[in-house]
C-alpha cells in the first residue's frame, strides 16, 4: 500500500526556477504532503491567486502580501521562503539621451510604473528617495502595462499625501518612454525597447552590478521580491504543513546552490558559472540565497518601512508580523 494515501494533497503554483526544481519534480518530497505543482509565469500566478485563490500554496509578491497583512487580512499564512530576489537599480530605464548615471535628475520627472504595489517599484522608489534625494511627491507617476497597454492595479492601495498616480490604458510604458512622454520607467523586467538591443532604451546605471554591490555592502539589503504563502484554512487544518514546506523548499534551494557551484560538469549554460558563483560568495557568504526571518531581517525591515512610507501598507509591520512564530522557531533548530 502506498504511503501517499495518508498524505495531504495540496496544490502549488510557482515560477519555474532552479531553486524549486527538485521540489517540483518530487526529488525533494514534502513530508506528509502530495503536491500537484503548476508552473506558471509570475504575473499569471499573482493575478489568479490574488483574485481567485485557485490553489493552496502560491508564490506571491511580498508587496501584495504585506499590504494584505497591514490591512488586517489574515487569509494567507506567509512562509519565510523567498524564491525571487533581485537588486533593483538595474530595473530603472531611461532613453539613451536621458539622465544616465544621474538619478538626481529624475526629480520632478514623469516616471512609469506597472503598479504602485509591485514589490520592485517599492524598492526603486525608496532608492530614489533615500539614496538620491528625489522627492516622490514631485514626480508625475504613470501606471500601465510594461509592453502591453491595459494593466490595472490588482490590489489597490492608498497613496502618500501629495502623490498622484495617473493610469494609462491606451499605450504601454515602453511606448511612452520611446515617444518621449516618460523620462524613466521602473519595472521588474526589462521593456521591449531595451531587450531589442537597439540602444534606444538603456539602464539608468551603466554599471548596475557595481552600484548594487556597493549598496549591499553598505546597507546589507538584498531585496526580496516574492515569498511563498499558504491559505489560512489549510494551515489551520494542518499546521504542521507550514514547517514541512519550509524544510522542503530549503532543501531544494540548497541542492540548486550545490549545482551552481559544481565545476565538474556545468549545470547552467553560463560561461564561468561556478567561478562567478564563488565570486558572489565573497560578497554574500556561503548561503547566497538565505531563507528564514533571522538572516533576512535587515532586508525585511527596510522593505516594510518603505512600504509603510509609500502607503502600500496601512500600518508599519515588523518581519515577525509576516510569519507564524512557530515556523522560525523550528527553522532555527
Image: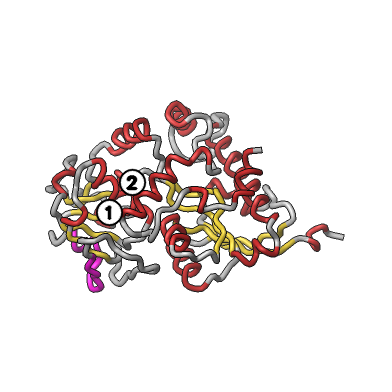
Q: Secondary structure at mark 1?
A: strand
Label 1 sits on residue: 186
Q: Which residue is mark 2?
A: 88
Q: Quadrant of the C terminus?
A: top right
Could you tell me how many numbered marks the image carries? 2
In reply to whether residue 322 is colored magenta, the answer given is: no
59 to the left or right of 205? right
- Of 39 and 160, nearer the camera is 160
Q: Residue at x 49, y 31 (%)?
A: 274
| Residue 41 to residue 294: above or below | below
Image coordinates of residue 166 in percent, x first then y, are: 22, 68
Counting residues from the start of the chain, the first of labels 1 and 2 encountered is: 2
Q: Quadrant of the N terminus?
A: bottom right
**Is there CB contact under 8 Å for labels 1 and 2?**
yes
Q: Looking at the image, can residue 47 be seen?
A: yes
- Where is residue 176, by image quadrant? bottom left
Within 10 Å of the Cα at label 2, are there few (<14), some (14-19), or many (20+) other Cα atoms? many
SS for callout 2 = loop
> What is the span of residues highlighted in magenta in the rendered image?
165-178
Which disc number belongs to residue 32? none
Q: Disc 1 and disc 2: Cα gap in Å?
A: 9 Å
Please report the residue visible at 53 percent of the width from the left and 64 percent of the height from the top: 74
Amino acid at each position: 500500500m502506498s504511503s501517499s494515501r495518508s498524505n495531504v494533497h495540496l496544490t502549488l503554483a510557482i515560477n519555474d526556477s532552479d531553486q524549486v526544481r527538485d521540489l517540483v519534480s518530487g526529488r525533494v518530497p514534502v513530508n506528509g504532503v502530495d503536491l500537484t505543482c503548476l508552473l506558471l509565469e509570475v504575473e499569471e500566478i499573482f493575478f489568479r491567486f490574488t483574485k481567485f485563490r485557485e490553489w493552496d500554496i502560491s508564490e506571491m509578491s511580498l508587496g501584495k502580501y504585506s499590504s494584505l497583512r497591514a490591512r488586517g487580512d489574515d487569509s494567507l499564512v506567509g512562509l519565510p521562503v523567498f524564491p525571487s530576489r533581485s537588486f533593483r537599480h538595474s530595473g530603472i530605464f531611461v532613453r539613451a539621451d536621458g539622465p544616465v548615471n544621474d538619478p538626481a535628475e529624475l526629480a520632478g520627472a514623469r516616471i512609469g510604473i506597472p503598479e504602485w504595489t509591485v514589490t520592485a517599484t517599492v524598492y526603486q522608489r525608496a532608492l530614489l528617495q533615500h539614496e538620491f534625494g528625489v522627492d516622490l511627491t514631485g514626480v508625475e507617476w504613470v501606471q500601465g502595462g510594461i509592453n502591453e497597454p491595459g494593466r490595472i492595479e490588482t490590489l489597490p492601495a492608498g497613496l502618500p499625501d501629495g502623490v498622484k498616480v495617473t493610469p494609462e490604458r491606451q499605450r504601454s510604458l515602453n511606448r511612452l518612454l520611446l515617444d518621449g512622454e516618460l523620462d524613466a520607467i521602473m519595472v521588474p523586467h526589462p521593456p521591449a525597447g531595451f531587450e531589442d538591443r537597439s540602444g534606444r532604451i538603456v539602464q539608468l546605471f551603466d554599471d548596475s552590478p557595481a552600484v548594487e554591490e556597493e549598496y549591499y555592502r553598505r546597507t546589507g539589503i538584498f531585496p526580496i521580491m516574492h515569498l511563498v504563502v499558504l491559505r489560512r484554512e489549510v494551515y489551520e487544518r494542518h499546521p504542521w504543513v507550514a514547517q514541512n514546506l519550509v524544510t522542503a523548499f530549503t532543501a531544494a534551494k540548497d541542492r540548486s546552490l550545490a549545482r551552481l557551484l559544481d565545476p565538474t560538469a556545468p549545470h547552467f549554460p553560463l560561461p564561468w558559472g561556478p567561478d562567478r558563483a564563488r565570486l558572489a560568495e565573497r560578497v554574500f557568504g556561503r548561503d547566497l540565497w538565505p531563507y528564514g526571518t533571522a538572516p533576512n531581517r535587515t532586508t525585511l525591515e527596510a522593505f516594510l518601512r518603505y512600504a509603510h512610507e509609500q502607503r502600500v501598507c496601512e500600518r508599519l509591520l515588523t518581519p515577525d508580523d509576516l510569519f507564524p512564530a512557530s515556523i522560525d522557531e523550528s527553522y532555527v533548530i
